[in-house]
Amino acid sequence: MAKSLGIFVTNDKNMNHIMGLTKAAKSKGSKVKVFFSWKGTLLAKDPQFGDLVKLADEVSICADSYKKMGYDPLTDIPEGLTDKEMSTQAQHGMIIDDYDCYVTL
């Protein structure tokens, strides 16, 4: 079975790194999950966000953090996501528990 990589994003300055890590991991056959929290949720407005959603196996956003950044998690759902991906910090816990490798950006 291929390894898995969980990416926990708390910073709004790393979209190029997130894309690069995701592409590299996917090219090696790894499963990739990206979870955005706190200021990282601002990257949902980055032009590359839709590409990331298509590339990664799973992408989700902390709805509470998204709201704190000024967005409505009920009506302003980012491109490519559904209301189910507007989630809680439990997603962060799942990455820690279920993924072979973990990185925070």
Image (cartoon, rainbow, N blue to C red):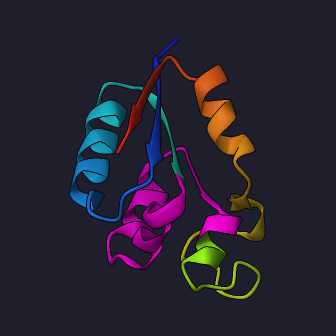
Residue 77 located left or right of residue 13: right
Q: Nearer the viewer, residue 103 or 99?
A: 103
> Residue 104, percent across and down?
39, 39
Q: Report the number of discs.
A: 0
Q: Main secondary structure of the magenta part?
A: helix
Residue sitting at the far top = 1
Side (left or right) of 91 relative to 11:
right
| Quadrant of the image occupied by residue 74 | bottom right
Q: Quadrant of residue 98?
A: top right
Residue 32: x and y, percent? Answer: 47, 37
Q: Is residue 37 magenta?
A: yes
Residue 79 location (% of width, % of height): 54, 77
Left or right: residue 96 versus residue 19 is right
- Residue at image coords 29%, 52%: 19
- In the displayed structure image, the side of residue 32 where residue 80 appears, left or right: right
Tell which residue pokes out farthest to the front in this image.
68
- Identify the residue shown where x is 73% and y is 58%: 87
The image quadrant where one finds the C terminus is top left
| Residue stretch in magenta | 36-65
Nearer-the-camera pick, 82 or 29 = 82
In the image, is residue 21 above or below residue 15? above
Q: Residue at x 45, y 65 (%)?
A: 39
Residue 101 position by quadrant: top left
Front residue (pair 38, 99): 38
Q: Residue at x 54, y 44 (%)?
A: 57
Q: Position of residue 24 (x, y in %)?
A: 25, 35
